[in-house]
Amino acid sequence: MGRQNSRKMWSIMALCAMIGFLLLPIATSLNALASGGGEAPPAAPVAKAEGDKKDAKVEKGRDVYYKTEGIVSGAPAPKTEDGPRDYPRYNFESRVLLWFANQQHLYYGSFVLAVPIFCMIIEFMGVVTKDRAMAKKYDQLAYDFIKISLTAYSLTAILGGILIFTFLTLYPAFFGYLSSIFRPVMHIYALMFVAESGTLYIYYYGWDKMKEGLLKWLHLSMSVILNVIGTCLMMLANSWIGFMMSPAGVDEQGRFLGNIWHVIHTALWNPLNVHRILGNMAFGGGVVAAYAAYRFLSAKTDEERAHYDWMGYIAMAIGVAFLIPLPFAGYWLMREVYAYRQQMGITLMGGLLAWLFIIQATMIGILFLSSNYYLWQALGRMRGAEKYQRYIKYLVFVLVVGFLIFITPHTIVMTPAELKAMGGQQHPVLGNYGVMSAKNGGINVIITTTVLSFIWYMRGNKEPMVPWKNFGNIFMGVFFGFAYVNIIWLAIYGYYIPANVRVGLSVPQVASTLSCLFFMTALNGVMLKGAKQMGPIEWGKISARSQYAIIMLATAFTWMMGLMGYIRSSVRLFWHVNEIMRDNSPWAYTHTVGFAANMISFNVLFFWVSILFVFWLGTLAAKKVPVEAKAHAPGRVPEPAHGH
Amino acid sequence: MEMMIIKAITDPIFWFALLAIGVVLLFVGKKMDLLNSTAYAAVVSVVIAVAYFHLVDHYMMDMQGLDYWYLFRK
C-alpha cells in the first residue's frame, strides 16, 4: 500500500512537472509579449505632450497584411547579393541540400508528432473499454506505437540540428533575418522541444509503473500534455512557413513592428495548421501500418502474424480516418491562398505549378485505391463477408472512372503538329473532364466509395438483428445511391452555370460525401448493435497482397507529402519571404517537373531506408523480451504481453 | 403553370415539407409494421433522400451567398 501511495505521489509530481514544462515557455514569453508582443496601450491624456515628443523620435511603419501601424522594432530585410557573404556554398546546389535536410526533418517530425496522438487515442480506448482482454490488447498496441516513435524521435532531433547547420552555413543572411523576426519565440520553440522530450521519456518509461487505476489515468493525462506540447511545436514551426508565404507583422521593408502575434498569425497559418495536423496523422498512420506490414511479412508464427495484422489494421484505419477530411482541408488552404493573393493561387493551380497538381491528383487516387484494395482483401479474413465479394467489381469500376476523371489534365504539352491534329489545346472529349467541376465530382465519388467499402468491411462478419433491418438496409442503399446522383448531378450542373456560381458547387458535393460518412457510419453502428456474428475475425489470415497495399499506401503518402511541400515552397518563386525578401541566389528559379520528381523520389527513398533501419532497431529490442513472456500466447487472436 | 412549379421547387419550404412527409411516413410505417415491406421502405427512403440532398444543395450554396437554383430561375 505504501509503495502504491509512493507511486501515486511520484506520478502526480511527474504530471505537475509536465504541466510546468508546458507552462514554462508561456512564462518565459510573458516578458517578450509585455515588451513588444502586443499593441501599444493608448497614452494617458496627461502624458500626451510628452508622448508627442517621443513620437517624433520613434519611427512607425504600416503592417503589410493587417494594415495597422506599429513602432519599427527591427532592421529591414537584407538585400542579398549572389556571393560568399550572403550565399556561401559548396560545389553543389545549396537549395537541393536544404531541400533534403528540410524534407527529412519534416518526415520524421510529422511521424513523431502523429504517433503520440495515436497512442493517446488507443490508450484511452484501452482505459474505457470494459473487456479486460481488449483493454490489455489496446494498451500493448499503444506501447508498441510509442516504442517505434522513440527511436525516430532521436533521429528527428539530429535532423533538426542538421537543418539548422545547413541554414546557417548556406543561407546565413536569410536565416539571420528570420531569426530576428521570430526572436521572441525562438527560445520558446527550443524550450518546447525540451518539454516534449522530457514528457515523452517520462510517458514511455513510466508505462509499466502506471498501468492501473488512478495511475493509468495520470499516465493518460501525460499523453494529453505530450500532444498539446507537440501540437504547439508544430504550430510554431508552421508560423515560419506561413510568414515566408504570406508575411504579416512587418512593414514593406520587412521591419518588425513589435507585434509577434501578427507575425505568427498570418493569413495562411490556420489553414496550414489544420492541413498539417491531418496530414501528419494520415502519414503517421501509414508509416505505422507499413511497420506492421513489414513485421507481418517477416513473421515466423501465426501469433505474430495475427498481432501485426491487427496492428496494421488499426493504424491504417486511423490513417484513413484522417485522410478522408484531408482533401477538404486542402481546399480550404487553397481558398485562403487565392484570398490572400489571387496570383499565387493561379501560379499553383492554373500556371507554372499546375502539372504538379495533376501528379498530386494521381497520388491521391492511388491512396484511395490502395485503401479500398486493403479493405476488400481484409474481407477475406471474415466468415460471412463472401456476400460482398461479387459486388467489388462494381466498386472498382466506379473508383476507376472517378480516378480517371480526377487525373485528366485541362491542357497538355504538345508539339505544333500534335496541336493541329487534335484541333486545339483541349481534346474534344477528354478536355471536358479537365475542369474543376468534373474533378470535384471525381474525387467525391472516390471518397464516397471508400466510405461504402468501409461500411461493408464493418458489416463483413455481422448480420444486423434490429427489427427494422430491412428498412435500414434499403435506406442505406438509397442514401448512398442518391449521394452519388447528387455528386454527379452537381458536377454536370457546373458546366451550365457561370463560373462565379459554379465555384460554390464543391461545398454541397463535399456535404453529400460527409453526410454518407457521418450518417451512414452512425446508422450502420446502430444497426450492428447486438448483431449476429457469423464468425470471428481471423487475424493473420489475410493475403500478403494486402500488406503490400499498405506499404504502397505509406509510400504514396510519403511521396505526396514531399510533392506538396515542394509545391508550397515553390509558389514563392524568387522570394525568400514573399514580396519582402528577394532570393538572389543562383537557384532562384523553379525546377523542371522531372527534376523535382527525381528529388522527391530520392527523399522518399532515403526516408524509407532510414525508417527501415529504425524498424530493424525495434526488432532488436523486441528480441530481448524474455521467452516466457511470449510462451503462453495462444491462437490467432492477438494476445498482449503482460509486461514491457 | 410552369412558373408556378419552378417557384415551388426552388423554395426550400417545398423540400422541407417533402422531408417532413418522409419522416411522417417512416413513423406511420413503424407503427403499422410496414417497414419490412420492401416497396414501402424504398418509397420512404427515396422521399427522405431526395428532400435531404436538395436541402443540402440549397443551403450549402445559400451559405456562400450563391443561388443553387440559378439555371432554373433563368
Image (tube, helix red, strand yellow):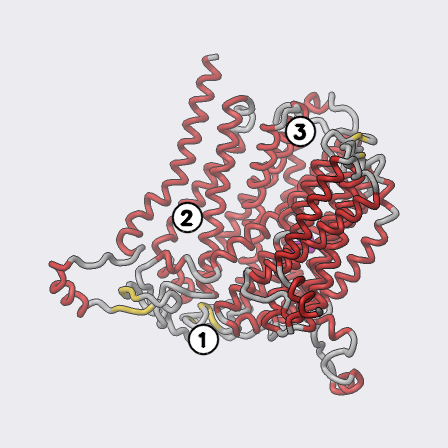
Give the residue furthest to the front.
Answer: B1
Distance of label 2 from label 3 (alpha carbons): 36 Å
Have a look at marks 2 and 3 and say if they share a chain.
yes
Q: Quadrant of residue B57?
A: bottom right
Of labels 2 and 1, the one closer to you:
2
* Residue B54 position within the rendered picture, expressed as x and y whole percent measured from the top left: 67, 58
Q: Quadrant location of the C terminus of chain A?
A: top right
* Of the image marks 2 and 1, the number of the one nearer the N terminus: 1
* Residue A9 position within the rendered picture, expressed as x and y whole percent measured from the top left: 42, 22
Which residue is the site of mark 3?
A137
Q: Residue A241, can we see it?
A: yes
Which residue is the site of mark 1?
A82
Distance of label 3 from label 1 (alpha carbons): 59 Å
Label 1, residues with CA under 10 Å away: few <14, some 14-19, many ≥20: few
What is the chain letter for disc 2?
Answer: A
Q: Secondary structure at mark 2?
A: helix
Which residue type does callout 2 highlight? Ala
Which residue type does callout 3 highlight? Lys
Label 2, residues with CA under 10 Å away: few <14, some 14-19, many ≥20: few
Q: Secondary structure at mark 3?
A: helix
Please indicate whether residue B20 sits to the left or right of residue A474 in the image.
Answer: left
Give the camera-side residue of A516 and B58.
Answer: B58
* Of the image marks 2 and 3, the number of the one nearer the N terminus: 3
Label tally: 3
Give the camera-side residue of A626 and A206.
Answer: A206
* Residue B25 position within the rendered picture, expressed as x and y whole percent measured from the top left: 73, 44
Looking at the image, residue A174 lies above or below residue B23: below
Which residue is the site of mark 2?
A190
User: Are the two marked residues, 2 and 1, in contact with CB atoms closer than 8 angstroms?
Assistant: no
User: Could you tell me which residue is drawn at 65 percent across and 57 percent down?
Assistant: B14
